[in-house]
Image (tube, rainbow, N blue to C red):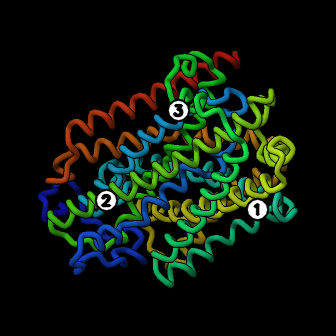
Amino acid sequence: MTDPTSDGATGWKRRSSVPSMSDVHRSVAVQGMNSSWRRAAAFFGPGYLVAVGYMDPGNWATSIAGGSRFGYTLLVVALISNIMAIILQSLCARLAIASGRDLAQACKDAYPKAVSRTLWALAEVAIIATDIAEVIGTAIGLNLLFGIPLEIGVVITALDVFLILYLQRLGFRWVEALVIVLLAVIAVCFVLQIVLADPNWGDVIRGFAPTTEIVTNPEMLYLALGILGATVMPHNLYLHSGIVQTRNYGDSLPEKREALKFATIDSTVALMFALCVNASILILAAATFNTTGRTEIAELGEAHSLLAPMLGAAIAPTLFGIALLCCGINSTVTATLAGQIVMEGFLDIKLPPWLRRLITRAIAIIPAAAITIWYGESGTAQLLILTQVILSLQLSFAVFPLVMFTADRRKMGDLVAPRALIAFAFFIAFVIAALNIKLLFDFLAAAA
């Protein structure tokens, strides 16, 4: 059955029977506000939930390893990754607002059952990889600040699902408020640490210039793809296309155009903030470790323990631990929401919201917790970097459907993406795919 809409989108096979995140769908008022500033402010929030995924503990591991090993060279990768993220997240908002579907629902509608189930399985793998990074990061943060063993810290991270359930009973804006407050704490911690590290700002600026060595050096490419996987994350594409629909923006074409404008501004500003945090992590590692010859630093715990003697300030490791714990909490919250969107969208399950969240959280956290406990404190850095490379390898399976949907006038109606934007998005998709193919080739060549 076709799903006609007010803007002429008639390319969907069936009506979307259950709205994305049905318990909070259209729960944030936008209609009826006379001031455009107030309507814009109503869209402030989803972008910051998305931005969390661009600065999660897995990103810390890759940025610390990249900064300590190669100095400021990989800053350009963080910049390029962020530009890619801004384009792709804008397409997520466009898909959601134009079609009333999140990316998972769109895939279920557009593809045969075997294909959509495969995409669901790949999305779950990506969320598990994300959760491994977040479980490790949160557990390490608890360990560094309070001496809580990793095994107990892992169990504590599972409690975030109850925090989400409680906050959403108060309203989805409370979830966003928690995330934004924690992001502000992270920003303050890194500003203070950068001041203590006193980097060479000329080298920092040069680090944003591209170099061919990133592609020709397999070790540098591996870390670059880790940064890419930690920045442009598959679960964020599903997440954004779901949570933007918490806004009650109306159904007319002018209302949808305005909603798309405000949602894009929100995500763009939030992702620029994420770039500042990501760059700060890499700059801190480069200024503290690379310049002193400590090029092998990759463990979060090791980085934490070395900050005080190398920066000469006892507060530095505490700031690092606080920021890491805040990142971990934020990331587990957003990963849980993404898991809900993926499972509901692909499988169309109809369960009470609390049960859906428990199931989606269990699917991700049980393997993540088992692997974390198995590895223990040793090898967590390698595991964190590996999870980010896995995310990078999974990325194409979310990016290509997203770009194809938003380029299809039959599915998007009058809100179809402009040709120039689609051309750039396809270029991004093929660059990601090509880099991943090269990574696999280098890996197989090294194994042989």
Tell me the element at label 3: helix
Disc assigned to residue 96: 2
In the depicted view, which residue is nearer to us: 306 or 409?
A: 306
Q: Residues within 10 Å of mark 1 (few under 14, many from 20)?
A: many
Per the image, the residue denoted by label 3 is 77
N-terminal of the pair, mark 3 or mark 1, is 3
In the depicted view, which residue is nearer to us: 143 or 70?
A: 70
Tell me the element at label 1: helix
N-terminal of the pair, mark 1 or mark 2, is 2
Q: Is residue 290 above or below residue 303?
A: above
Image coords of residue 86 (percent x, y): 39, 46
Say what amino acid the circle numbered 1 marks. Answer: Val
Per the image, the residue denoted by label 1 is 154
Tell me the element at label 2: helix
Q: Nearer the viewer, mark 3 or mark 2?
A: 3
Say what amino acid the circle numbered 2 marks. Answer: Ala
